[in-house]
Amino acid sequence: MLDTTILQQVKDVFKDLTHQYTFKVTAHPQHEKAAELKEFINDFISTSQLFKAQFVETDDMTIQFSLLKDNEETGVMFRGIPNGHEFTSLLLAILNADGKGKNLPDDAICKRIQRLKGNIKLQTYVSLTCTNCPDIVQALNVMALISQKITHEMIDGALFQDEVERLNIQAVPTVYANGELLHIGRGSLGELLTKLEDMIGSEEDENEEPVERHYDVVVVGGGPAGASAAIYSARKGLRVAIIANNIGGQMKDTVGIENFISVPKTTGANMADNLLTHLKEYPIDVFDNRRVDKAFFYEELKKVHVKGGEIFISPAVIIATGASWRKLNVQDEAKYMGHGVHFCPHCDGPFYKDKHVAVVGGGNSGVEAAIDLAGICKQVTLLEFGETLRADTVLQDKAKSLENVEIFTMAQTTAIVGDGQKVTAIRVKNRNNDEERDIAVDGIFVQIGLAANADPFREALPLNQRHEIEVDNYCRTSVSGVYAAGDVTNVPYKQIMIAMGEGAKAALSAFDDRIRGVIPRLQE
Protein backbone atom coordinates (compact mmCIF):
# COMPACT_ATOMS: atom_id res chain seq x y z
CA MET A 1 0.00 0.00 0.00
CA LEU A 2 2.84 2.35 0.90
CA ASP A 3 5.31 2.60 -1.97
CA THR A 4 8.99 1.87 -1.48
CA THR A 5 10.03 5.52 -1.63
CA ILE A 6 7.69 6.48 1.21
CA LEU A 7 8.73 3.44 3.24
CA GLN A 8 12.39 4.39 2.94
CA GLN A 9 11.62 7.96 3.98
CA VAL A 10 9.71 6.71 7.01
CA LYS A 11 12.61 4.41 7.93
CA ASP A 12 14.91 7.43 7.94
CA VAL A 13 12.47 9.36 10.13
CA PHE A 14 12.36 6.59 12.73
CA LYS A 15 15.99 5.48 12.70
CA ASP A 16 16.74 7.05 16.11
CA LEU A 17 13.72 5.78 18.07
CA THR A 18 14.51 4.33 21.49
CA HIS A 19 11.19 2.83 22.65
CA GLN A 20 9.00 -0.08 21.56
CA TYR A 21 5.67 0.74 19.84
CA THR A 22 2.67 -1.51 19.33
CA PHE A 23 -0.17 -0.80 16.91
CA LYS A 24 -3.24 -2.38 18.52
CA VAL A 25 -5.66 -2.83 15.63
CA THR A 26 -9.36 -3.55 16.18
CA ALA A 27 -11.47 -4.25 13.09
CA HIS A 28 -14.53 -6.07 11.87
CA PRO A 29 -13.31 -8.58 9.29
CA GLN A 30 -16.13 -7.64 6.90
CA HIS A 31 -15.54 -3.91 7.04
CA GLU A 32 -14.86 -2.61 3.53
CA LYS A 33 -11.56 -1.06 4.68
CA ALA A 34 -10.39 -3.82 7.06
CA ALA A 35 -7.99 -5.42 4.58
CA GLU A 36 -6.63 -2.04 3.55
CA LEU A 37 -5.97 -1.06 7.17
CA LYS A 38 -4.17 -4.36 7.82
CA GLU A 39 -1.99 -3.83 4.75
CA PHE A 40 -1.28 -0.23 5.82
CA ILE A 41 -0.24 -1.29 9.34
CA ASN A 42 1.94 -4.14 8.10
CA ASP A 43 3.70 -1.82 5.67
CA PHE A 44 4.14 0.80 8.38
CA ILE A 45 5.61 -1.52 11.03
CA SER A 46 8.17 -2.73 8.48
CA THR A 47 9.91 0.63 8.82
CA SER A 48 11.35 -0.07 12.29
CA GLN A 49 12.41 -3.09 14.33
CA LEU A 50 10.83 -1.34 17.30
CA PHE A 51 7.33 -1.65 15.78
CA LYS A 52 4.88 -4.51 16.05
CA ALA A 53 1.18 -5.00 15.42
CA GLN A 54 -1.58 -6.70 17.36
CA PHE A 55 -4.77 -7.53 15.41
CA VAL A 56 -8.09 -8.09 17.18
CA GLU A 57 -11.43 -8.88 15.51
CA THR A 58 -14.59 -7.20 16.79
CA ASP A 59 -18.33 -7.51 16.21
CA ASP A 60 -18.62 -3.74 15.80
CA MET A 61 -18.53 -2.54 12.19
CA THR A 62 -15.42 -0.43 12.71
CA ILE A 63 -11.72 -0.17 11.99
CA GLN A 64 -9.37 1.54 14.42
CA PHE A 65 -6.02 1.29 16.12
CA SER A 66 -4.36 2.70 19.20
CA LEU A 67 -0.70 3.43 19.79
CA LEU A 68 1.10 1.75 22.70
CA LYS A 69 4.55 2.74 23.97
CA ASP A 70 6.44 0.03 25.84
CA ASN A 71 3.12 -1.85 26.12
CA GLU A 72 1.38 1.13 27.75
CA GLU A 73 -1.44 3.05 26.06
CA THR A 74 -0.39 6.53 24.93
CA GLY A 75 -3.96 7.80 24.61
CA VAL A 76 -3.52 8.32 20.84
CA MET A 77 -6.02 6.52 18.58
CA PHE A 78 -6.98 6.55 14.91
CA ARG A 79 -10.40 5.43 13.65
CA GLY A 80 -9.79 4.95 9.97
CA ILE A 81 -6.61 4.89 7.88
CA PRO A 82 -4.44 7.99 8.43
CA ASN A 83 -3.59 8.62 4.81
CA GLY A 84 -3.42 11.98 3.05
CA HIS A 85 -2.65 14.88 5.34
CA GLU A 86 -3.12 12.71 8.43
CA PHE A 87 -0.15 10.47 7.58
CA THR A 88 2.04 13.18 9.07
CA SER A 89 -0.10 13.14 12.22
CA LEU A 90 0.77 9.46 12.73
CA LEU A 91 4.49 10.07 12.18
CA LEU A 92 4.51 12.97 14.63
CA ALA A 93 2.54 11.05 17.25
CA ILE A 94 5.31 8.44 17.37
CA LEU A 95 8.14 10.97 17.31
CA ASN A 96 6.49 13.02 20.05
CA ALA A 97 5.89 9.92 22.16
CA ASP A 98 9.62 9.20 21.82
CA GLY A 99 10.51 12.77 22.82
CA LYS A 100 11.92 13.58 19.39
CA GLY A 101 9.12 15.64 17.91
CA LYS A 102 9.36 19.25 16.87
CA ASN A 103 5.96 20.50 18.02
CA LEU A 104 6.10 19.66 21.73
CA PRO A 105 5.01 22.60 23.91
CA ASP A 106 7.13 24.27 26.58
CA ASP A 107 6.85 23.64 30.31
CA ALA A 108 4.27 26.38 30.93
CA ILE A 109 1.85 24.88 28.41
CA CYS A 110 2.52 21.34 29.66
CA LYS A 111 1.56 22.41 33.19
CA ARG A 112 -1.72 23.86 31.95
CA ILE A 113 -2.52 20.60 30.13
CA GLN A 114 -1.76 18.50 33.20
CA ARG A 115 -3.96 20.73 35.36
CA LEU A 116 -7.13 20.06 33.35
CA LYS A 117 -9.79 18.49 35.56
CA GLY A 118 -10.96 14.90 35.30
CA ASN A 119 -10.67 12.35 32.53
CA ILE A 120 -11.11 13.82 29.07
CA LYS A 121 -12.11 11.90 25.93
CA LEU A 122 -11.35 13.92 22.81
CA GLN A 123 -12.59 13.03 19.32
CA THR A 124 -11.77 14.85 16.09
CA TYR A 125 -13.75 14.24 12.90
CA VAL A 126 -11.58 14.91 9.86
CA SER A 127 -11.43 14.74 6.11
CA LEU A 128 -8.19 13.32 4.72
CA THR A 129 -8.13 16.20 2.20
CA CYS A 130 -8.51 18.93 4.83
CA THR A 131 -5.42 21.11 5.25
CA ASN A 132 -6.47 22.43 8.67
CA CYS A 133 -7.32 19.05 10.23
CA PRO A 134 -3.74 17.85 10.88
CA ASP A 135 -2.97 20.88 13.07
CA ILE A 136 -5.90 20.01 15.31
CA VAL A 137 -5.18 16.27 15.35
CA GLN A 138 -1.51 16.81 16.13
CA ALA A 139 -2.25 19.32 18.89
CA LEU A 140 -4.72 17.01 20.63
CA ASN A 141 -2.40 14.02 20.22
CA VAL A 142 0.23 16.06 22.06
CA MET A 143 -2.23 16.70 24.89
CA ALA A 144 -2.92 12.97 25.16
CA LEU A 145 0.81 12.23 25.30
CA ILE A 146 1.38 14.83 28.03
CA SER A 147 -1.53 13.89 30.30
CA GLN A 148 -2.57 10.36 31.24
CA LYS A 149 -6.08 11.72 31.88
CA ILE A 150 -6.57 12.59 28.20
CA THR A 151 -7.30 10.35 25.21
CA HIS A 152 -7.68 11.52 21.62
CA GLU A 153 -9.18 9.75 18.64
CA MET A 154 -8.91 10.88 15.03
CA ILE A 155 -12.03 9.82 13.10
CA ASP A 156 -12.19 9.75 9.29
CA GLY A 157 -15.67 11.16 8.72
CA ALA A 158 -15.92 9.62 5.25
CA LEU A 159 -15.86 6.10 6.76
CA PHE A 160 -18.43 6.81 9.47
CA GLN A 161 -21.15 8.71 7.63
CA ASP A 162 -23.98 7.51 9.91
CA GLU A 163 -22.15 8.99 12.87
CA VAL A 164 -21.42 12.22 10.99
CA GLU A 165 -25.06 12.59 9.99
CA ARG A 166 -26.29 11.81 13.51
CA LEU A 167 -24.07 14.54 14.92
CA ASN A 168 -24.96 16.86 12.02
CA ILE A 169 -21.29 17.50 11.24
CA GLN A 170 -20.92 19.73 8.19
CA ALA A 171 -17.43 21.05 8.71
CA VAL A 172 -14.00 19.73 9.56
CA PRO A 173 -12.19 19.52 11.79
CA THR A 174 -14.93 19.09 14.39
CA VAL A 175 -13.81 18.29 17.94
CA TYR A 176 -15.84 16.77 20.78
CA ALA A 177 -14.77 16.64 24.43
CA ASN A 178 -16.57 14.04 26.55
CA GLY A 179 -19.37 14.01 24.00
CA GLU A 180 -19.83 17.79 23.92
CA LEU A 181 -18.94 19.98 20.95
CA LEU A 182 -15.67 21.80 21.68
CA HIS A 183 -14.37 23.27 18.44
CA ILE A 184 -14.98 23.58 14.69
CA GLY A 185 -12.45 24.65 12.06
CA ARG A 186 -8.85 25.82 12.12
CA GLY A 187 -7.20 26.17 15.49
CA SER A 188 -4.05 25.75 17.52
CA LEU A 189 -3.02 23.89 20.65
CA GLY A 190 -3.27 27.10 22.66
CA GLU A 191 -6.78 27.86 21.43
CA LEU A 192 -7.96 24.30 22.10
CA LEU A 193 -6.39 24.30 25.55
CA THR A 194 -8.14 27.54 26.45
CA LYS A 195 -11.48 26.11 25.33
CA LEU A 196 -10.91 22.99 27.42
CA GLU A 197 -10.02 25.11 30.45
CA ASP A 198 -13.24 27.08 29.97
CA MET A 199 -15.36 23.93 29.48
CA ILE A 200 -13.84 21.54 32.00
CA GLY A 201 -11.84 23.71 34.38
CA SER A 202 -8.35 23.44 35.83
CA GLU A 203 -6.81 22.55 39.15
CA GLU A 204 -5.28 25.87 40.17
CA ASP A 205 -2.46 26.34 42.65
CA GLU A 206 -3.39 29.41 44.67
CA ASN A 207 0.13 29.69 46.08
CA GLU A 208 1.87 29.73 42.73
CA GLU A 209 3.34 33.11 41.78
CA PRO A 210 2.97 34.47 38.21
CA VAL A 211 6.02 33.93 36.01
CA GLU A 212 7.60 37.24 34.97
CA ARG A 213 9.72 37.35 31.83
CA HIS A 214 11.83 40.42 30.97
CA TYR A 215 12.95 41.38 27.46
CA ASP A 216 14.24 44.37 25.52
CA VAL A 217 11.43 43.89 22.99
CA VAL A 218 8.24 41.86 23.23
CA VAL A 219 6.45 41.09 19.96
CA VAL A 220 2.82 39.98 20.20
CA GLY A 221 1.73 38.00 17.15
CA GLY A 222 3.36 35.33 15.01
CA GLY A 223 2.27 36.22 11.50
CA PRO A 224 4.34 37.93 8.79
CA ALA A 225 4.42 41.27 10.64
CA GLY A 226 5.31 39.73 14.00
CA ALA A 227 8.02 37.47 12.60
CA SER A 228 9.55 40.38 10.69
CA ALA A 229 9.51 42.61 13.78
CA ALA A 230 11.14 39.92 15.92
CA ILE A 231 13.90 39.20 13.39
CA TYR A 232 14.71 42.87 12.81
CA SER A 233 14.84 43.45 16.57
CA ALA A 234 17.10 40.44 17.13
CA ARG A 235 19.45 41.63 14.39
CA LYS A 236 20.05 44.72 16.52
CA GLY A 237 21.39 42.51 19.30
CA LEU A 238 18.34 42.89 21.52
CA ARG A 239 16.72 40.27 23.74
CA VAL A 240 13.49 39.44 21.97
CA ALA A 241 10.41 37.40 22.83
CA ILE A 242 7.58 36.64 20.41
CA ILE A 243 4.20 35.70 21.92
CA ALA A 244 1.75 34.05 19.54
CA ASN A 245 -1.16 31.70 19.25
CA ASN A 246 0.78 30.10 16.41
CA ILE A 247 3.56 31.04 14.00
CA GLY A 248 2.01 31.94 10.66
CA GLY A 249 -1.24 33.43 11.87
CA GLN A 250 -4.07 33.98 9.41
CA MET A 251 -1.68 33.29 6.55
CA LYS A 252 -1.93 29.55 7.31
CA ASP A 253 -5.50 29.63 5.95
CA THR A 254 -4.24 30.67 2.52
CA VAL A 255 -3.80 27.66 0.29
CA GLY A 256 -2.15 29.40 -2.69
CA ILE A 257 0.15 32.45 -2.55
CA GLU A 258 1.29 33.80 -5.91
CA ASN A 259 1.92 37.49 -5.19
CA PHE A 260 4.88 37.31 -2.82
CA ILE A 261 7.53 38.82 -5.04
CA SER A 262 10.48 36.50 -5.86
CA VAL A 263 8.43 33.44 -4.88
CA PRO A 264 6.20 32.60 -7.88
CA LYS A 265 4.03 30.10 -6.03
CA THR A 266 3.82 28.78 -2.47
CA THR A 267 1.26 28.00 0.23
CA GLY A 268 0.40 29.64 3.51
CA ALA A 269 1.48 26.53 5.41
CA ASN A 270 4.87 26.46 3.68
CA MET A 271 5.44 30.14 4.29
CA ALA A 272 4.52 29.70 7.96
CA ASP A 273 7.10 26.92 8.24
CA ASN A 274 9.66 29.21 6.60
CA LEU A 275 8.88 31.98 9.11
CA LEU A 276 9.55 29.61 12.01
CA THR A 277 12.77 28.38 10.41
CA HIS A 278 13.96 31.97 9.99
CA LEU A 279 13.04 32.88 13.57
CA LYS A 280 15.13 29.96 14.81
CA GLU A 281 18.18 31.42 13.08
CA TYR A 282 18.25 34.10 15.79
CA PRO A 283 18.26 34.01 19.62
CA ILE A 284 14.53 34.76 19.73
CA ASP A 285 12.44 33.17 22.48
CA VAL A 286 9.25 31.87 20.84
CA PHE A 287 6.28 31.50 23.19
CA ASP A 288 3.55 29.99 21.03
CA ASN A 289 0.16 28.63 22.05
CA ARG A 290 -0.39 31.80 24.09
CA ARG A 291 -3.44 34.03 24.33
CA VAL A 292 -3.12 37.57 25.62
CA ASP A 293 -5.56 38.29 28.44
CA LYS A 294 -4.75 41.95 29.07
CA ALA A 295 -2.05 44.56 28.73
CA PHE A 296 -0.86 47.56 30.74
CA PHE A 297 1.02 50.16 28.72
CA TYR A 298 0.97 53.42 30.68
CA GLU A 299 4.14 52.79 32.69
CA GLU A 300 7.69 52.93 31.34
CA LEU A 301 7.87 49.15 31.51
CA LYS A 302 4.95 47.65 29.62
CA LYS A 303 3.26 44.46 30.83
CA VAL A 304 1.53 41.83 28.71
CA HIS A 305 -0.43 39.18 30.64
CA VAL A 306 -1.14 35.84 28.95
CA LYS A 307 -3.48 32.98 29.82
CA GLY A 308 -1.82 30.71 32.36
CA GLY A 309 -0.22 33.36 34.55
CA GLU A 310 2.86 34.52 32.58
CA ILE A 311 3.66 38.25 32.49
CA PHE A 312 5.96 39.65 29.80
CA ILE A 313 7.68 42.92 30.78
CA SER A 314 9.51 45.20 28.37
CA PRO A 315 10.08 48.89 27.57
CA ALA A 316 9.04 48.16 23.97
CA VAL A 317 6.03 46.16 22.80
CA ILE A 318 5.22 45.58 19.14
CA ILE A 319 1.63 44.43 18.50
CA ALA A 320 1.22 42.34 15.34
CA THR A 321 -1.80 40.18 16.13
CA GLY A 322 -3.22 40.34 12.59
CA ALA A 323 -6.86 39.80 11.76
CA SER A 324 -9.54 37.11 11.63
CA TRP A 325 -12.33 36.28 9.22
CA ARG A 326 -14.98 38.99 9.25
CA LYS A 327 -18.50 37.74 9.95
CA LEU A 328 -21.70 38.87 8.25
CA ASN A 329 -23.38 39.71 11.60
CA VAL A 330 -26.83 38.85 10.28
CA GLN A 331 -29.74 36.87 11.72
CA ASP A 332 -28.91 33.21 12.56
CA GLU A 333 -25.33 33.35 11.27
CA ALA A 334 -23.96 32.21 14.63
CA LYS A 335 -26.65 29.53 14.95
CA TYR A 336 -25.53 27.79 11.75
CA MET A 337 -21.79 28.30 12.12
CA GLY A 338 -20.25 24.98 11.10
CA HIS A 339 -23.69 23.72 10.05
CA GLY A 340 -23.92 25.43 6.71
CA VAL A 341 -22.00 28.65 7.37
CA HIS A 342 -18.27 28.34 6.71
CA PHE A 343 -15.12 30.36 6.12
CA CYS A 344 -12.69 27.83 4.61
CA PRO A 345 -13.76 26.46 1.19
CA HIS A 346 -10.73 24.17 1.01
CA CYS A 347 -11.62 22.48 4.29
CA ASP A 348 -15.40 22.27 4.07
CA GLY A 349 -16.03 22.42 0.33
CA PRO A 350 -15.95 18.59 -0.06
CA PHE A 351 -19.06 18.37 2.16
CA TYR A 352 -20.99 20.09 -0.65
CA LYS A 353 -20.13 17.87 -3.58
CA ASP A 354 -22.88 18.16 -6.20
CA LYS A 355 -24.76 20.67 -4.04
CA HIS A 356 -25.60 24.36 -4.33
CA VAL A 357 -23.54 26.86 -2.31
CA ALA A 358 -23.30 30.61 -1.99
CA VAL A 359 -20.10 32.62 -1.65
CA VAL A 360 -20.44 36.06 -0.06
CA GLY A 361 -17.73 38.48 -1.13
CA GLY A 362 -16.38 39.60 -4.49
CA GLY A 363 -12.76 40.28 -3.60
CA ASN A 364 -9.86 37.97 -4.41
CA SER A 365 -10.73 35.53 -1.61
CA GLY A 366 -14.39 35.32 -2.59
CA VAL A 367 -13.82 34.85 -6.29
CA GLU A 368 -11.05 32.29 -5.67
CA ALA A 369 -13.44 30.40 -3.39
CA ALA A 370 -16.14 30.44 -6.07
CA ILE A 371 -13.69 29.07 -8.65
CA ASP A 372 -12.49 26.31 -6.33
CA LEU A 373 -16.01 25.33 -5.25
CA ALA A 374 -17.20 25.25 -8.86
CA GLY A 375 -15.02 22.18 -9.35
CA ILE A 376 -16.87 20.37 -6.54
CA CYS A 377 -20.37 21.80 -6.34
CA LYS A 378 -23.31 21.60 -8.73
CA GLN A 379 -23.94 25.34 -8.53
CA VAL A 380 -22.13 28.33 -7.00
CA THR A 381 -23.84 31.68 -6.41
CA LEU A 382 -21.39 34.55 -5.85
CA LEU A 383 -22.80 37.59 -4.02
CA GLU A 384 -21.07 40.98 -3.99
CA PHE A 385 -22.31 43.98 -1.99
CA GLY A 386 -20.90 46.60 -4.38
CA GLU A 387 -21.60 47.47 -8.00
CA THR A 388 -18.69 45.44 -9.34
CA LEU A 389 -16.46 42.58 -8.27
CA ARG A 390 -13.22 43.71 -6.58
CA ALA A 391 -11.04 40.72 -7.45
CA ASP A 392 -8.13 40.78 -9.86
CA THR A 393 -9.25 40.77 -13.49
CA VAL A 394 -7.72 37.36 -14.19
CA LEU A 395 -9.83 35.86 -11.39
CA GLN A 396 -13.00 37.61 -12.52
CA ASP A 397 -12.54 36.34 -16.08
CA LYS A 398 -12.06 32.80 -14.83
CA ALA A 399 -15.17 32.89 -12.63
CA LYS A 400 -17.31 34.37 -15.42
CA SER A 401 -16.18 31.62 -17.77
CA LEU A 402 -17.54 28.84 -15.53
CA GLU A 403 -21.04 27.65 -16.47
CA ASN A 404 -22.00 26.68 -12.91
CA VAL A 405 -21.04 30.05 -11.35
CA GLU A 406 -23.76 32.70 -11.08
CA ILE A 407 -22.71 36.22 -10.08
CA PHE A 408 -24.88 38.92 -8.47
CA THR A 409 -23.67 42.40 -7.60
CA MET A 410 -25.44 44.98 -5.42
CA ALA A 411 -26.49 42.02 -3.28
CA GLN A 412 -26.73 42.48 0.48
CA THR A 413 -27.02 39.42 2.70
CA THR A 414 -29.67 40.10 5.36
CA ALA A 415 -30.22 36.71 7.03
CA ILE A 416 -29.30 33.04 7.12
CA VAL A 417 -32.28 30.70 6.72
CA GLY A 418 -32.34 27.16 8.13
CA ASP A 419 -34.52 24.35 9.40
CA GLY A 420 -33.02 24.29 12.89
CA GLN A 421 -30.34 21.77 11.95
CA LYS A 422 -28.74 23.12 8.80
CA VAL A 423 -28.82 25.99 6.30
CA THR A 424 -31.56 25.90 3.67
CA ALA A 425 -31.24 29.36 2.09
CA ILE A 426 -29.56 32.75 2.16
CA ARG A 427 -31.72 35.90 2.27
CA VAL A 428 -30.46 38.60 -0.09
CA LYS A 429 -31.61 42.18 -0.69
CA ASN A 430 -31.22 43.74 -4.12
CA ARG A 431 -29.66 47.12 -3.30
CA ASN A 432 -31.02 48.61 -6.56
CA ASN A 433 -34.68 48.19 -5.57
CA ASP A 434 -34.57 46.91 -1.90
CA GLU A 435 -36.41 43.71 -2.83
CA GLU A 436 -35.56 40.67 -0.71
CA ARG A 437 -35.57 37.04 -1.77
CA ASP A 438 -34.40 33.69 -0.41
CA ILE A 439 -31.91 31.79 -2.55
CA ALA A 440 -32.09 28.07 -1.76
CA VAL A 441 -28.57 26.81 -0.95
CA ASP A 442 -27.03 23.98 1.00
CA GLY A 443 -24.06 25.94 2.32
CA ILE A 444 -22.64 29.44 2.58
CA PHE A 445 -18.98 30.47 2.48
CA VAL A 446 -18.27 33.92 3.92
CA GLN A 447 -15.34 35.73 2.30
CA ILE A 448 -15.79 39.41 3.17
CA GLY A 449 -12.38 40.27 4.47
CA LEU A 450 -10.76 40.42 7.87
CA ALA A 451 -11.37 42.07 11.25
CA ALA A 452 -8.45 43.30 13.36
CA ASN A 453 -7.50 41.18 16.40
CA ALA A 454 -7.20 44.16 18.73
CA ASP A 455 -9.66 43.23 21.52
CA PRO A 456 -6.99 42.32 24.14
CA PHE A 457 -5.65 45.88 23.86
CA ARG A 458 -8.89 47.85 23.76
CA GLU A 459 -8.41 49.12 27.34
CA ALA A 460 -4.70 49.85 26.87
CA LEU A 461 -4.80 51.64 23.52
CA PRO A 462 -7.32 53.77 21.63
CA LEU A 463 -8.86 51.99 18.62
CA ASN A 464 -10.49 53.55 15.55
CA GLN A 465 -14.06 52.90 14.37
CA ARG A 466 -12.94 49.72 12.61
CA HIS A 467 -11.40 48.52 15.90
CA GLU A 468 -7.91 48.82 14.42
CA ILE A 469 -4.86 50.19 16.22
CA GLU A 470 -3.92 53.55 14.75
CA VAL A 471 -0.25 54.09 13.95
CA ASP A 472 1.81 56.85 12.35
CA ASN A 473 4.17 56.43 9.41
CA TYR A 474 6.73 54.86 11.75
CA CYS A 475 4.32 52.29 13.25
CA ARG A 476 4.22 54.22 16.53
CA THR A 477 0.96 54.22 18.47
CA SER A 478 -0.26 57.07 20.67
CA VAL A 479 1.50 55.43 23.66
CA SER A 480 5.28 55.81 23.89
CA GLY A 481 7.05 52.46 23.69
CA VAL A 482 4.11 50.69 22.03
CA TYR A 483 4.20 49.98 18.29
CA ALA A 484 1.88 48.08 15.96
CA ALA A 485 2.23 46.54 12.53
CA GLY A 486 0.31 44.60 9.91
CA ASP A 487 -3.39 43.78 9.63
CA VAL A 488 -4.21 44.81 13.22
CA THR A 489 -3.47 48.45 12.30
CA ASN A 490 -5.12 51.10 10.15
CA VAL A 491 -2.51 50.70 7.41
CA PRO A 492 -4.34 50.12 4.10
CA TYR A 493 -3.98 47.07 1.87
CA LYS A 494 -3.85 43.95 4.00
CA GLN A 495 -1.16 41.98 2.18
CA ILE A 496 1.55 39.60 3.40
CA MET A 497 4.31 41.63 1.82
CA ILE A 498 3.04 44.89 3.29
CA ALA A 499 2.70 43.31 6.74
CA MET A 500 6.31 42.13 6.64
CA GLY A 501 7.47 45.63 5.73
CA GLU A 502 5.41 47.17 8.50
CA GLY A 503 6.87 44.71 11.02
CA ALA A 504 10.38 45.78 9.99
CA LYS A 505 9.40 49.46 10.33
CA ALA A 506 8.02 48.88 13.83
CA ALA A 507 11.21 47.13 14.96
CA LEU A 508 13.43 49.87 13.53
CA SER A 509 11.28 52.58 15.13
CA ALA A 510 11.51 50.86 18.51
CA PHE A 511 15.28 50.56 18.15
CA ASP A 512 15.56 54.22 17.12
CA ASP A 513 13.52 55.28 20.16
CA ARG A 514 15.77 53.16 22.35
CA ILE A 515 18.93 54.79 20.97
CA ARG A 516 17.49 58.29 21.37
CA GLY A 517 16.41 57.60 24.94
CA VAL A 518 12.71 57.94 24.21
CA ILE A 519 12.15 54.54 25.85
CA PRO A 520 14.28 53.18 28.68
CA ARG A 521 16.69 50.29 28.52
CA LEU A 522 16.41 47.34 30.84
CA GLN A 523 19.20 47.10 33.39
CA GLU A 524 21.86 44.70 32.24
Image (tube, rainbow, N blue to C red):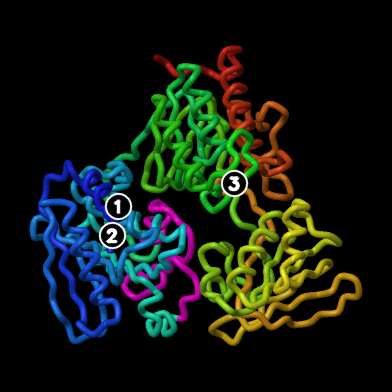
2 or 3: tag closer to the N-terminus = 2
User: Is the residue 422 above or below the residue 399 in the image?
Assistant: below
- Left/right placement of residue 73 relative to residue 253 reads left
Observer-nearest residue: 335 or 413? 413
Farthest residue, direction top: 516
Question: Is disc 2 surrounded by few (<14), some (14 to 19) or many (20+) residues within 10 Å?
Answer: some
Is residue 290 visible in the rendered structure shown here? yes
The answer for how far apart the CA atoms under marks 2 and 1 are is: 6 Å
Which residue shows up at 41% across the image and 37% down it? 311
Q: Are marks 2 and 1 in contact (CB under 8 Å)?
A: yes
Image quarter hosting the N terminus: bottom left
Which residue is found at the position 33% from the left and 61% from the top?
Answer: 201
Q: How far across and down, in percent of the image, does residue 254 sit? A: 56, 52
Magenta-span inclusion, residue 124: no
Residue segment shown in magenta: 168-196
Residue for badge 1: 6
Disc 2 target residue:
2
- Amino acid type, mark 2: Leu
For the residue carrying disc 3, how many other residues have a C-alpha within 10 Å: few (<14), some (14-19), or many (20+)?
some
Between disc 2 and disc 3, the foreground one is 2
Kindly identify which numbered label has been placed on residue 114: none
Q: Which amino acid does label 1 sit on?
A: Ile
User: Mark 1, residues whose alpha carbon is within 10 Å: few (<14), some, or many (≥20)?
Assistant: few
Up the image or down, 456 lies above or below 346; here it is: above
